Amino acid sequence: MFFLYNLLLLLASPVIFAILLAKKRCRPGLRQRLGWLPRDLVEGRDGRPTIWVHAVSMGEATAVVSLVQQLKTRYPAVRVFVSTVTETGKETVLRRLAGQAAHLYFPLDFRWSVRSALLAVRPNLIVVVETEFWPNFLREASARRIPVILVNGRLSTDSFAGYRRIRPFFRRVLAAFTLCAMQTDRDVERMIQLGVEPKRVVRTGNLKYDQVAASAQATAGLLSRQDLRLAGGEELLVAGSTHPSEEEAVLGCYRRLLDVAPALVLVLAPRHIERTEDVVKAVQSHGFTAVRRTKLPGAGGAPITGPRVIILDTRGELATLYRDATLVFVGGSLVNVGGHSPLEPAAWGKAVVFGPHMDHFAEAAEQFLACGAGVMVHDTDEMTQVMTALLMDRSRLEAMGKAAYQLVLENQGALARTVALIARILEGDAR
């Protein structure tokens, strides 16, 4: 099956290279994606051990910031490389881990590019984040007897169903993992069903609970009400990480909410800021003034008044914006993409409204609903009804926010457990 996988990969290679060349943002890292790493990036080891952490994009890179920092504190001599696939992931690494880890682009899963990258980095340990199961990369690491640990592991329903269809193949792929540290009991059970030995699968919890709590405590550089030019009595409805069609639903809800809260200002934070122009057009089609975050005047500018929609066309500011939100909707949940994190607003003590498609955060969504920290809605009408009720009952809104914050507190600890497991492997005791 590995032969068949590599044959299909070879046949698809012209399309893969065409896509990479066509995308301007992919061209700067193309040589690294082919396994050719800059000499100055990987030289100068001086016998020091090396850890290679792979976090595909911004979300995964953000989740392991605290993990990398703790490992560097515990093992200051260790060199750490953090690889990503996306440009947003690279920006996160460079911004959040400057001086602690070097960034590199993850190689395409051709055997020759993977071998070249592994030979250049020569890791003593590989840490894979969440769901990055690249067959050739894992097989080549195993052939070199490099320990590989999966951290913050999860398996969505769709991914699990796909892997089960070719279970014999993925059983061999997953055999490369020395240890799988999973987010939930559901994820543990799914890995075992895919053929991973039970003794190599443990539940550690979700690193994002620790990460969002730490971010909420770090108040320096937070996006402020003044930055958004809000007047004194204005309140915010923040719709985070939205996808196409979700903006339409939120805009429809916002128009109706203005009847009960005329001082409400909507912030739309599209998941992909490349869609900003489309979001601007959607806002204008609903008759609202569209204000891009990057076009707001500098410090000292006068507040802007009246109903309007601020479009957050920047990266890295959404999590801090939740601090000043009155109402929160978490996107990727009215459309079937698996949902985005409800933990960031919860860390600021905010009630969370989300749609029915929360598979990527299924256990968290269940907990939010069970403890009254969140509400599930299915369409614009339900969203409007729920948010209107919350605006009319502020004591309930406050109680939900407190429940959300308590949920974050109660679920911390994954970071310490994960660091302990990695330490055990690094120090030669993988029992």
Image (cartoon, rainbow, N blue to C red):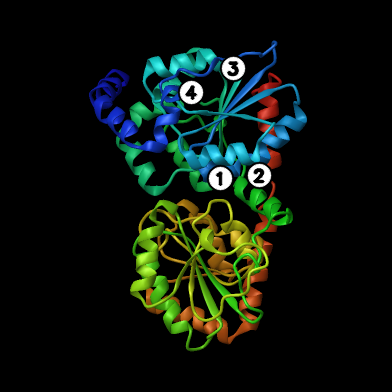
Q: Nearer the viewer, mark 4 or mark 3?
A: 3
| Separation of marks 3 and 1 at Cα, in angstroms | 36 Å
Q: SS class of the residue under badge 1?
A: loop
Q: Which residue is mark 2?
A: 414
Q: Residue 278 appears at what percent x and percent y? A: 35, 60
Spatial CA span between label 4 and label 3 = 30 Å
Q: x, y (%) of residue 327?
A: 56, 73
The residue indicated by pointer 3 is: 40
Asked which secondary structure carries label 4, the reply is loop
Q: Kindly identify the amino acid type of the residue bearing the numbered disc 4.
A: Ala
Total of numbered circles in the picture? 4
Q: Amino acid at mark 1?
A: Gln
Q: Quadrant of residue 286?
A: bottom left
Mark 1–mark 2 Cα distance, whole angstroms, equals: 8 Å
- As measured in the structure, the alpha-carbon distance from the residue carrying label 1 to the one carrying label 4 is 19 Å
User: Circle 4 is placed at which residue position?
Assistant: 176
- Which badge, 3 or 1, is on the more N-terminal residue? 3
Are discs 1 and 4 less than 8 Å apart at CB? no
**Residue type at numbered disc 3:** Asp
The secondary structure type at the circle numbered 2 is helix
User: Label for residue 183?
Assistant: 1
Residue at the spot 35% in from the left edge and 68% down from the top edge: 282
Contact between marks 2 and 3 (CB within 8 A): the answer is: no
Disc 1 to disc 2: CB gap under 8 Å: yes
> Does residue 26 lie above or below 332 as drawn?
above
Seen in the picture, residue 244 relative to 23 is either above or below; the reply is: below
Viewport quadrant of the N terminus: top left
Closest to the observer, 14 or 208: 14
